[in-house]
Image: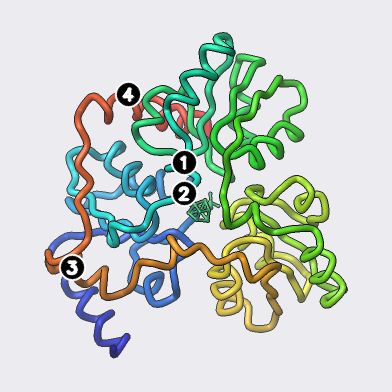
Amino acid sequence: MNIPSVQSDILRLKREKDVCILAHSYQTRDIVEIADFTGDSYALSVQASKTANKTVIMCGVRFMAETVKILSPEKNVFLANPLAGCPMAELMSKEVVEAAKRDYPDYTVVAYINTTADLKTICDVCVTSSSAVKIVSKIENKNILFIPDCNLGDYVSKQVPEKNFKLLRGGCPIHAAVNTEEVKAAKEKHPNALLLVHPECTPLVVKYADYVGSTSGIMDFAKKSGAKEFIIGTEIAIVQHLQYACPDKRFYLLSKKLLCPNMKITSLIDVLNCLQGTGGEEIIMDRETIAKARVCIDKMIELG
Ligand code: 13P
Ligand code: SF4
């Protein structure tokens, strides 16, 4: 495959067909280069509500494409590769959340955006890793039922100690797999490096971090920092994007487990096929799901 030639076909087709391509920052560089907008989950949601194009292609995972559809039901929204799902989002069942709501009826249900559209219909407000602390602090209710990521929930609970938190068992299998032995080994190997981690990592790992934040938060911190070396505790794409952006600095991946197969399943050819009408999957959602799921996404944008 000749990457520049596929990229120029994509750029031509997207202009001709009035398509906006959104890419999560875990996508590979060849995809980021043809995207109209790249960012973390929060930035993508906000961008999705602003874009004027009639059609949107999401290079990321299914819940991200669903979020675009919920915010812009009149648009044709495609997931570039239909196999790209987020296990954290897909493993949290509605029955479990409904049971927790019965057990804790006076709790506000805060859903990480990494949830299915169907699950969002029974939640009160969404958050992303970059907006969670701010949004939870602004919620009037003292009682917070945080789903589905108990690691992010634990991190937020420590930043907002005045609230009561109930967490359900769920999370990102990629970030949660990193352990403290890997942290110690990486710090020993790179003693001058700062450790930047995503809050989807376990509290034991987060405890060692010099900075904790979303993918965009980590990128901004590393770019602005006066330090020269960084150990990156999030998906490998961030190491690669940072190394391009800051050639005078050095970035090391905290653990080789930090490669999300779902985020890596989308290829440049998938994007081309989607634009040509021979690939991708259009997100179809009934009006009721859109209306109910939208309530908690709108609340996130209002408070975020
Ligand atoms: P952010 O984009 O909010 O940092 O989340 C990372 C992630 O795991 C997305 O699936
Ligand atoms: Fe889901 Fe984790 Fe992959 Fe993000 S990195 S898409 S949370 S499995």
CA–CA distance between discs 3 and 1?
A: 37 Å
Mark closest to the chain's N terminus, 2 or 4: 2
Q: Would residue 256 appear left or right of 208 to someone viewing this image?
A: left
Q: Which residue is mark 1?
A: 91
Residue 125, compared with residue 159, is above or below; it is above
**N-term-proximal mark, 2 vs 3:** 3
Q: Is mark 2 within 8 Å of ligand 2?
A: yes
Say which element carries label 1.
helix
Q: Quadrant location of the N terminus? A: bottom left
Evaluate if marks 2 and 1 touch, with contact meaning CB atoms under 8 Å apart: yes
Give amino acid for label 2.
Pro
- Per the image, the residue denoted by label 3 is 15
Q: CA distance from mark 2 to mark 4?
A: 23 Å
Percent position of residue 231, x then y: 73, 69
- What residue is shown at x 60% (from left), y 52% (from top)? 214
How does the figure colour the protein chain or chains? rainbow
Distance Cα–Cα, label 2 vs label 1: 6 Å
Specify whether 270 is left or right of 114: left
For the point 35% across and 42% down, the residue is 67
In this rendering, the label closer to the viewer, 3 or 4 = 4
Q: Relative to 142, say whether 201 is above or below.
A: below
Give how far across and how far down residue 48 sits, in percent.
Answer: 34, 47
Q: Mark 3 near mark 1, Cβ–Cβ under 8 Å?
A: no
What residue is disc 4 on? 292
Callout 1 crowding tier (Cα within 10 Å): few <14, some 14–19, many ≥20:
few
In the picture as drawn, the residue positioned furthest to the top comes out as 106
Return the residue at label 2.
87
Query: Element at badge 3?
Result: helix
Tag 4: amino acid? Lys
